Amino acid sequence: MSDVRREPRRQMTADDESLTSELVIGADGRVHVFGTSLAILEALDAIGVRGDAVRARLAAASATVAPPTTAAGGS
Amino acid sequence: MDAASLARAADAAAAHERRCLLCEHRCGADRAAGQLGPCRAGTEARVFRHRVEHGEEPELVPSHLFYLSGCDLRCAFCIAEERAFDPRIGTPLDAPFLRRALEWGRARGARNLQWVGGEPTIHLPAILRAMAGAGELPPIVWKTDLHATPEALRLLAGVVDVQVADFKFGNDACAARIAGVPRYVEIVTRNLLLVSASTRLIVRHLLLPGHFECCFLGIVRWLADHLPGARVSIRDGYLPKWQARHHADLRSPLPADAGSLARREAALLGLDVVE
């Protein structure tokens, strides 16, 4: 444990990466997605990547008519 | 939980800003006075990214993820790299920021608020304060390494609707070598039993190359024995990132069939495997 109070050395805005995704295509052809938007999910579905997994998430997204809310979270 | 209850929970959690016992390092740091424990966090939480995700488990998507910098573990393969470990990175979390961000997420169809990291548990007081002042909240998802103390878990009870718990290692030797944490299995298994008694639980495991026997099998067999039918999300997107190059076993990607083999094994053990 130390007593050194440090000042923030870098300020990022919280939404810097909110609208971006990272795709990595491995040497074996596998696609790794970090930050999956609905558009990316639709693109993956179109090219047949991880068919069942992608379709399950597309179905869940399309089932979201209105986001459910509680008074202030919790159960 | 209503705003007044959240405010009371935040007041109770604030004791940990004077003597922090939120994670099992139990460092006792007086964070309010500037002392830094292993996680290096002060009293302020910072969000380095928030976005509506569609790649989470189907029952959670679309999920509005808030990524907080700072973590109590030091996993060599962490995909978030520096941002996970440096709590000085990001925008300070407070109620006005959270309220605005949640409006943004609602407009994009988010059905829940998911706290992720780094590790959100180390920021529990700041998170509770922000939620108490943020107005109407969606259901709350807590994505955690489950290295929390029972004291922290008690503060979360009734606040969180779903816990998404990482079960990273199947034995203490791998946990100590790769994440620098002792007593890993004892702590995580104790917490899984505590959490599952009161909260909906999804157990996540990121497959690591070369750790099928020592980690994956140990984890799914423990789950089958102690939490039969548990909801399990097996991730096969491992990439050698961050400090993984320092570990010979972590330098390669997973074999292409590792995910399907692992899901089949988990299903054979009676676990509820996420597609």
Image (cartoon, rainbow, N blue to C red):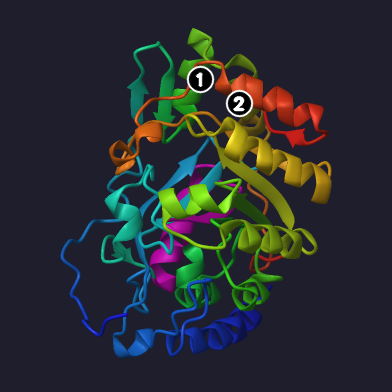
The chain identifier of the residue carrying mark 1 reads A
Q: Can you see residue B161?
A: no
Q: Secondary structure at mark 1?
A: helix
Residue at image coords 29%, 85%:
B34
Q: Is residue B158 visible?
A: yes
Label 2: element kind: helix
* Residue farthest front in this picture: B173
Quarter holding the C terminus of chain B?
top right
Q: Which residue is mark 2?
A: A58
Q: Is residue B225 magenta?
A: no
Q: What residue type is disc 1 on?
A: Glu
| Quadrant holding the N terminus of chain B | bottom right
On screen, residue B107 versus residue B250, left or right, reads right
Please state the extent of the stretch shown in magenta in the rendering.
Answer: B94-119
Quarter of the image holding residue B238?
top left
Chain containing the residue with disc 2: A
What's the amino acid at mark 2? Leu
Q: Is residue B107 magenta?
A: yes
Q: Which residue in the structure is indicated by mark 1?
A: A42
Q: Earlier in the sequence, mark 2 or mark 1?
A: 1
Q: Position of residue A26 (x, y in %)?
A: 36, 18
Instruction: Measure how far apart labels 2 and 1 are at the Cα level.
Output: 7 Å
Position of B86 with respect to B256 (left or right) is left
**Residue depicted at 64% across the width and 68% down the height:** A72
Q: Residue at x 15, y 65 (%)?
A: A9
